[in-house]
Image (spheres, grey):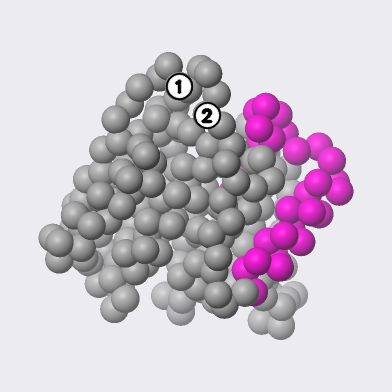
Amino acid sequence: EAIIANGGHEFPLILAQQHSQGGGTEIFIHMPIAGHLFAASTGIFEQLGLNVADARIITSSKDYAFDTYVLLEEDGEAISNNQRIEDIINRLRHELVQTDFTNKQANRRTTRQLKHFKTHTRVSFNQDEHNHRTVMELITADRPGLLSKVGLALMECDVNLQNAKITTVGERVEDVFFISDNNQQPIKDEELLDKLRNSIIAFLDN
């Protein structure tokens, strides 16, 4: 209803509502797809001290983003302050209209509990020829800023993000990213896949 009412006049279109399950706050972003969208959005959440409990990244066939993030405060509580939600929306609007992306990651510390939970980062790839994309699976330990670091690695390697499924079980992250090259085709260049794998590991484990 909001997209129809907007009529393509205002981008990004950003909406917020309380998540019906789990107690988080849903942030919905609709706009023409941009290479910095995922990295910028998750980077803003990181700067604001928010945790991404779930994410659904969807790109339409006409290159529009339909992205939904479920956010929690750093202590795991829902966002209850309306002014806080308005601040999140305003920050997103300001940053996402910028054409030049600047990495402004915050330096949040990993909690003592997470420091003791060791999971070496693993990145694997499979080809989904039917849907013209490559499936990237990431298994690692949860930590502050994880998604924004993945977003930076994707930007660094000039790889497009078509879709994502974010899953955190305790301190273990098992995320799936559906990616493609600039021609919206599966990535078959082994050198590029190795570069992306090494970039993600470098961002996360260093």
Pointers 2 and 1 in contact (C-beta within 8 Å) = yes
Name the residue rendered at 66%, 81% in the picture: 8
**Residue 184 image offset from top left, x and y in percent:** 30, 74
Q: Quadrant of the N terminus?
A: bottom right
**Which stretch did the figure color magenta?**
69-97
For residue 100, which quarter of the picture? bottom right
Question: Type of residue at label 2?
Answer: Thr
Q: Secondary structure at mark 1?
A: helix
Give above or below for 53 relative to 14: above
- What amino acid type should be assigned to the residue bearing mark 1? Lys
> Which residue is found at the position 81% from the left and 37% from the top?
80
- Numbered mark located on residue 110 in the image: 2
What residue appears at the point 52 percent right and 29 percent down from the top-left corner? Answer: 110
Q: Is residue 148 visible?
A: yes
Label 1 Cα neighbours within 10 Å, binned few <14 / some 14-19 / many ≥20: few
Res. 7 visible in picture: no
For label 2, the SS is: loop
Image height of 82 relative to 61, above or below: above
Q: Tell me the CA gap for discs 2 and 1.
A: 6 Å
Percent from the top left, x then y, of residue 166? Answer: 45, 43
Residue, disc 1:
115
Q: In terms of sequence position, does the residue under pointer 2 or pointer 1 come before the other?
A: 2
Q: Quadrant of the C terminus?
A: top left
* Residue 22 appears left or right of 138: right
In the image, 37 versus 26, the foreground residue is: 37
Please tell me which residue is depicted at 20% across the width and 63% down the height of the picture: 192
